[in-house]
Amino acid sequence: MNPKIWLSSPHMGDQEFNFVKEAFETNWIAPLGPHVNGFEHDLEEFTGAKYAAALSSGTAALHLALIMLGIKAGDEVICQSFTFSATANPIVYLGAIPVFIDSEPDTWNMCPDLLEQAIKDRIAKGKKPKAIVPVHLYGMPAKIEQIIAIAAKYEIPVIEDAAEALGSTVNGKAAGTFGIMGVLSFNGNKIITTSGGGALISDDEKIIDQARFLATQARDAAPHYQHSQIGYNYRMSNVCAGIGRGQMRVLTDRVTQRRKVYDTYLKYLPEFSNFDFQTEPEGYFSNRWLTTILVNPAKNNGVDRETIRLCLEKENIESRPLWKPMHLQPIFENYPSYINGQSEGLFNNGLCLPSGSNLSQDDLERVISNIKSHFHYISQQKEI
Ligand SMILES: *Cc1c(COP(=O)(O)O)cnc(C)c1O
């Protein structure tokens, strides 16, 4: 059996281990310390956000963001439907109601027209949404300028889920820095990883101070443990932040490498197939976290995405359908939703290909030739 090719696996540079070693040597094995501060500083520099709080996960960052906007049980929060469940879960942690919005075809993210329609409709029904959570999926930024303009018109705050989009920009501005808060993730499969972790970024110092306070059990200033608010244990450990500091030194390379993976697929797959690729609108820059293809059987001699996925799986190559939209998930299907069919179509035809920055040229050739051989086989069958 050939060695496994993963969808997206951790890719360390040569400094991460030194930072972790330093944490051990100085005994900073705690959810605070110099690496946490250093990592936050690196994130601020890279994204251009004025402030960053390093946290235990992207999910924790979303949870705190919603708490700080005062979201309470029964409130409605608008959320992109086409996403990973971690975008929607924290809304439900608070007893609030997610209102799901479908995607538009250019970026596959939240459709601004449906968003405005939903806001008007929720207001007409007597409940103005308390927040809007768009997502920059697979590294492709959402139509964030349009979304921000609509949000401003109705005075609703925006929390950007940029968990997959560190390194992506719109007109030179980093994904995650358009809304009042942005959420980043450093889980094991993201463009950089701290083995597990996340961050909240914002230009508002008070918000980030409050996030750090809530993330460390909401301790009031007193020599004893004094609490006037409910706290959380959501801070990033100094050991993990050490990994993060090393990863920040190679982040720009990682973006370049992932974009090269995309370019390689784009160069070779169309030679024998008619897959659709995600393209960057004018002014958009995607970190190309995952390369995704749409496999329309009508344009590909009857080959569908599941055929390709199973064929790759047999060859020990991991690929994955696109995210199943939240409005189609058993746990979320009864919440309100504004749907145009876009995300369901993406889910039915879409496939994420191995996209790690550590894939070798040989790995990529293996993926491409496996798809190609199967494709020929199928198309020959169809032609007979
Ligand atoms: C990974 C991810 C999250 C959650 O981040 P964690 O650090 O894994 O908690 C949230 N939203 C999206 C879109 C993600 O891909």
Image: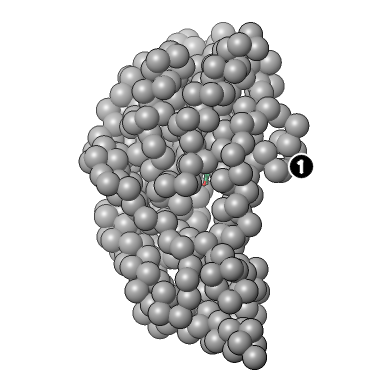
Q: Position of residue 148 (x, y in %)?
A: 38, 25
Amino acid at pointer 1: Pro
Q: Nearer the viewer, residue 26 or 45?
A: 45
The N terminus, quarter of image: bottom right
372 lies left or right of 380: left
Answer with the quarter of the image where residue 238 lies: top left
Q: Determine the secondary structure under disc 1.
A: loop
Q: Is mark 1 within 8 Å of ligand 1?
A: no
Quadrant in which the C terminus is drawn: bottom right
Q: Residues within 10 Å of mark 1 (few under 14, many from 20)?
A: few
Looking at the image, residue 89 lies above or below residue 278: above
Image height of 321 relative to 212, above or below = below
Q: In this orientation, which residue lies closer to the viewer: 249 or 178? A: 178
Residue 265 lies, in percent from the top left, at 40, 71
Residue at 65% of width from left, 68% of height from top? Answer: 306
> Residue 226: in sight, yes or no?
yes
> Residue shown at 39%/37% (left/top)?
143
Q: Which residue is mark 1?
A: 330
Asked whether residue 2 appears in the rendered view, the answer is no
Residue 32 x, y percent position in the rendering: 42, 34
Residue ID at (40%, 79%): 271
Q: How many marks?
A: 1
In the figure, 187 relative to 361: above or below? Answer: above
The extreme front residue here reads: 384
Q: Quadrant of residue 84?
A: top right
User: Residue at left 58%, top 84%?
Assistant: 379
